[in-house]
Image (spheres, coloured by chain):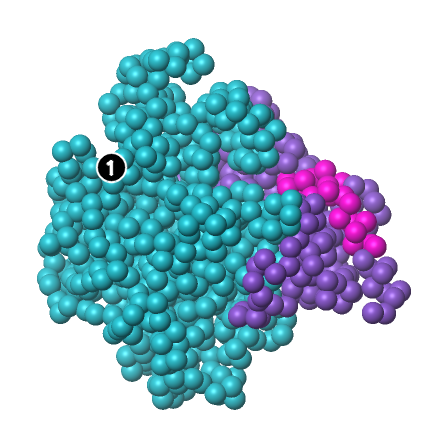
């Protein structure tokens, strides 16, 4: 199949950047979206141009590296699917596809489609953990965890830290990402001792990084490739309210 | 320049492991190590390259002990290390199922599964530590699968007859890695770890015979800088990407380990490669990586091909009587659950015989129809839903109604830098953990044991053993302008500049693909003398072509992904040759290394314990010189070597 691509090119953080048109004539519907870019890049290199820079690694939807806005949607049109797992059978011959980086104030562009998501790591560092130094753990069966709680914790923990939720949000909020971690750790008995301090510190870090506030548009959950449910944000709000209005 | 030749050097031995009863070796070793006093720990600096399960857990644990840690990864975040992709689970001898498991059984299974090419001491320690790993991860909040009573669920996995595998749906690696990553971030916040994301180690710095630092390139600014320390830990993962197509993440590479090898670290058993039986088959020339379908699928899926070659009917139209459930037929005791090496080769054999399925004929069916009939669709969906979804996304086919097509793919490398019981390489002060080292799995790794090994190394072994080195060595500070540092920086700069200046007419990927084909054909599932020699003739030529006609666009002073790839492929082009040489010299078959010349009458791998019961640890002898083979003899006192049989 033949595809027309309009791709965001930007040499560096201080460059203005613009969309540039390319054509790929020999795409195949069994190709993944990133393989399409591989094919384009091979051609660009041989033509003496610079290839399009994009983040990727696992190419199976779990590392969270890939991060593109495809035709206006973070990770493209297919539900619950990362860019790397999107295949060209979802596009039609002759289609024009626009590819841009995940845009948000807190995610500065590094080059082309590559953005800096270091703010996510700093949010986790501020409290997204359970303090359990190596060697200090009791037997794994010492504390049973009811299955419904364990399952809910798992659902929230499935977040891959890709940032699509932020790119989709009109306010550039990372509430879904943040709520996912709060819910994962807050559901578990092991997460209780730090539950209040965790949410306070993480919300502070979130705001300090320049992510916007949540106005419940729900765009984040639509874009999320791991289908993190919107109720993690309600959980975040409840936990935050609890932590800031009561003293334990 | 070609070599199919090598020289034999002095034998090598692991002197760090205590003698005596195996059950207390680890305890005695921990008691024997010198301790660093807490005040001194704060002054000591350790570099950890890699943030996967091994490196992430090591960096966090070392910082908890009080050391100053610098942690490096090439991804934009430590959370994206390739460990994140592990699906199936992690073993531990908890015997929560009361089904006869024990530390000794896990030890026994792992030594046997490794086809008697691993060290008993190491494997026993691994089995002991497996218990603590699960405790540690649960305390961190890893959401393992649980039963209704709230206790942890287990499954049997990858050739084990007991249920000792702990899992978190098909995302066990992700959840374990997030546990380690969060512990790491906690230490970053506390100031114990300085994190260098998007940094790639390109050289090891050795001063007075000891590892004292690395040269790393900041992948965003392009700047190369030296980082100095009292010890260096490599946790840089496996080298399966030498085959171009593998289940590894695209960035996985051998550079860190290979640079250390060139500086004197022995590289052990490079030819031991694990080919995983259940991956999605290649669909075309554009293919950039292969996707694993977790082996747990073999617990309920049945593997078959049509009895007759060239049968082009849809799978549903082929009656039971005309199907060959070849694993169940050949291995009635283990059936679809035979270890990976055996399942992979059986699939290859039926495809070679022209009975493969799918458009390329390189595939076999993995069929869930019986499981769905027996358990119901919801139960199958609960167990495997996310894997089925993944399959459907990639192939466009629905595995609930059409059997999956699978084919073996390169998955894991048992070989790696040689380390002693303390996980120290042959360069003092250079430690190697996780898939990057060669320890524990022998010639074949059992399912769910890489996660176990990575975390054992990082959480529990290294933090206990590295102190012995640090307490016992009087290290003086190294200056940034010391000759060894300046030279290492200059080497890196030179290499980068050369790669950019060749400006030839072939892309890095095209070289990588050609190398991959060559390795898959001749150093893959089945190896022959003639094939390996062919590869050994071609690889040096290919390397020469690379260095004279590769085209790497752009500059060194920005994010340049072509340049990153070029450096990695350049190192693969050297490693590949050593892999083939190792495979050629080992004329026996063992585990993942199947030499066609060495098989039993019924086509099973035939080991040759009289001649090959050793670790092949290769020394680098300089460019163009024959490598030096150092043999470490393997002793088996507790598990007597026998021909593996899964019939
Ligand atoms: C698809 C898949 C599924 C698997 N499933 C299972 C399973 O179910 N159970 C099991 O036990 N095992 C499984 N494995 C194997 C297991 O996941 C790996 O062996 C293990 O995770 C390796 O961990 P590691 O910490 O050694 O390396 P990795 O996780 O690969 O980490 C390597 C780290 O090193 C860094 N790095 C590498 N080179 C450099 C450099 N030059 N400079 C700076 N940083 C560098 C990377 O950035 C990364 O942080 C699976 C493997 C794959 C591919
Ligand atoms: S919540 Fe979803 S969209 Fe946001 S980072 Fe996590 S996985 Fe990505
Ligand atoms: S490349 Fe890993 S999630 Fe897409």
Residue B611 in which image quadrant? bottom left
Range drawn in magenta? A219-238
Please tell me which residue is depicted at 54% across the width and 35% down the height of the picture.
B384
Q: Relative to the observer, which residue lies in front, A24 or B503?
A: A24
Principal secondary structure, stretch drawn in magenta: helix
Residue B328 in which image quadrant? top left
Residue B283 in which image quadrant? top left
Chain identifier, purple in the render: A
Please tell me which residue is depicted at 64% across the width and 68% down the height of the picture.
A131
- Compared to residue A157, the image places residue B26 above or below, namely below
| Image quadrant in which the C terminus of chain A is located | bottom right
| In this picture, residue B29 sits left or right of residue B632 | right
- What hue does chain B carry in this figure? cyan
| In this picture, residue A191 sits left or right of residue B312 | right
Pinpoint residue B494: horizontal percent, then vertical percent: 34, 65
Q: Is residue B617 magenta?
A: no
Q: Is residue B638 visible?
A: yes
Numbered marks: total: 1
Q: Relative to the observer, which residue lies in front, A91 or B70?
A: B70
SS assignment at label 1: helix
Pointer 1 residue = B521
Pinpoint residue A242: horizontal percent, then vertical percent: 85, 61
- Compared to residue B552, the image places residue B616 above or below, namely below
- Compared to residue A69, the image places residue B107 above or below, namely below
Pinpoint residue B375: horizontal percent, then vertical percent: 55, 27
Please tell me which residue is depicted at 29% across the width and 14% down the height of the picture.
B308
Q: Is residue B90 visible?
A: no
- Compared to residue A66, the image places residue B205 above or below, namely below
């Amino acid at each position: 199949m033949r595809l027309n691509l309009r791709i965001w090119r930007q040499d560096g953080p201080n460059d203005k950047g613009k969309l540039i048109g390319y054509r790929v004539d020999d795409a195949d519907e069994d190709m993944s979206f990133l393989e399409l870019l591989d094919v384009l890049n091979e051609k660009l290199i041989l033509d003496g141009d610079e290839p399009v820079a994009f983040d990727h690694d696992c190419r199976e939807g779990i590392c969270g590296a890939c991060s593109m806005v495809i035709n206006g949607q973070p990770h493209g049109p297919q539900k619950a699917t990362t860019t790397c797992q999107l295949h060209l059978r979802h596009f039609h011959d002759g289609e024009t596809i626009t590819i841009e980086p995940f845009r948000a104030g807190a995610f500065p562009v590094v080059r082309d489609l590559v953005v800096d998501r270091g703010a996510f790591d700093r949010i986790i560092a501020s409290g997204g953990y359970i303090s359990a130094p190596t060697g200090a753990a009791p037997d794994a069966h010492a504390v049973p965890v009811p299955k419904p709680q364990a399952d809910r914790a798992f659902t929230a923990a499935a977040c891959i830290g890709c940032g699509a939720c932020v790119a989709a949000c009109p306010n550039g909020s990372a509430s879904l990402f943040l709520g996912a971690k709060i819910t994962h750790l807050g559901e578990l008995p092991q997460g209780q001792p730090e539950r209040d301090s965790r949410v306070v510190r993480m919300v502070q870090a979130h705001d300090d990084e320049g992510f916007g506030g949540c106005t419940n548009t729900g765009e984040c959950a639509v874009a999320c490739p791991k289908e993190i449910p919107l109720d993690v944000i309600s959980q975040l709000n409840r936990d935050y309210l609890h932590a800031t209005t009561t003293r334990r | 320049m070609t070599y199919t030749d090598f020289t034999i050097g002095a034998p090598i031995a692991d002197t760090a492991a205590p003698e005596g009863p195996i059950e207390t070796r680890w305890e005695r070793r921990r008691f024997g190590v010198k301790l660093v006093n807490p005040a001194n720990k704060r002054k000591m600096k350790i570099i950890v390259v890699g943030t996967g399960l091994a490196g992430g857990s090591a960096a966090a644990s070392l910082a908890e002990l009080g050391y100053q840690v610098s942690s490096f990864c090439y991804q934009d975040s430590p959370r994206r290390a390739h460990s994140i992709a592990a699906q199936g689970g992690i073993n531990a001898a908890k015997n929560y199922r009361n089904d006869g498991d024990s530390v000794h059984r896990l030890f026994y299974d792992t030594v046997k599964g490794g086809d008697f090419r691993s060290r008993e001491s190491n494997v026993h320690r691994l089995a002991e530590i497996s218990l603590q790993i699960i405790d540690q991860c649960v305390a961190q909040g890893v959401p393992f699968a649980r039963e209704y009573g709230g206790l942890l669920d287990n499954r049997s996995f990858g050739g084990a007859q007991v249920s000792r595998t702990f899992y978190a749906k098909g995302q066990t690696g992700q959840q374990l890695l997030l546990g380690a990553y969060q512990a790491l971030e906690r230490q970053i916040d506390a100031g114990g770890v300085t994190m260098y994301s998007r940094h790639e180690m390109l050289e090891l710095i050795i001063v007075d015979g000891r590892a004292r630092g690395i040269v790393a390139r900041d992948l965003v600014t392009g700047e190369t800088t030296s980082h100095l320390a009292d010890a260096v830990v490599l946790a840089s993962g496996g080298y399966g990407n030498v085959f171009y197509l593998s289940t590894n993440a695209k960035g996985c590479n051998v550079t860190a380990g290979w640079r250390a090898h060139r500086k004197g670290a022995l590289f052990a058993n490079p030819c031991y490669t694990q080919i995983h039986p259940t991956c999605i088959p290649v669909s075309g020339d554009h293919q950039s990586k292969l996707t694993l379908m977790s082996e747990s699928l073999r617990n309920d899926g049945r593997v078959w091909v049509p009895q007759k070659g060239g049968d082009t009917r849809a799978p549903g139209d082929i009656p039971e009587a005309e199907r060959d459930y070849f694993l169940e037929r050949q291995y009635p005791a283990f059936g679809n659950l035979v270890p990976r090496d055996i399942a992979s080769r059986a699939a290859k054999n039926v495809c070679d015989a022209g009975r493969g399925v799918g458009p390329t004929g390189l595939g076999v069916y993995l069929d869930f129809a019986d499981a769905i009939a027996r358990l119901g669709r919801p139960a199958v969906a609960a167990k495997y839903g996310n894997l089925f979804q993944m399959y459907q996304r990639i192939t466009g086919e629905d595995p609930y109604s059409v059997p999956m097509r699978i084919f073996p793919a390169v998955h894991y490398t048992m070989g790696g830098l040689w380390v002693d019981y303390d996980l120290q390489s042959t360069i003092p002060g250079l430690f190697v953990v996780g898939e990057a080292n060669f320890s524990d799995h022998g010639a074949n790794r059992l399912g769910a044991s890489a996660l176990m090994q990575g975390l054992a190394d990082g959480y529990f072994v290294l933090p206990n053993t590295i102190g012995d080195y640090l307490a016992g060595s009087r290290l003086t500070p190294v200056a940034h302008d010391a000759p060894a540092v300046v030279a290492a920086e200059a080497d890196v700069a030179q290499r980068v500049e050369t790669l950019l200046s060749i400006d030839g007419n072939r892309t890095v990927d095209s070289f990588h693909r050609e190398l991959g084909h060559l390795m898959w054909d001749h150093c893959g599932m089945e190896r022959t003398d003639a094939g390996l020699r062919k590869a050994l003739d071609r690889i040096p030529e290919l390397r020469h072509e690379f260095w004279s006609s590769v085209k790497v666009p752009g500059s060194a002073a920005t994010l340049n992904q072509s340049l990153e790839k070029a450096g990695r492929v350049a190192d693969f082009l050297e490693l590949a040759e050593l892999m083939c040489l190792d495979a050629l010299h080992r004329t026996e078959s063992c585990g993942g290394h199947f030499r066609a010349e060495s098989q039993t009458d019924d086509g099973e791998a035939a080991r040759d314990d009289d001649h090959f019961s050793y670790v092949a640890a290769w020394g680098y002898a300089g460019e163009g010189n024959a490598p030096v083979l150092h043999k470490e003899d393997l002793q088996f006192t507790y598990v007597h070597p026998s021909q593996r049989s899964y019939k």
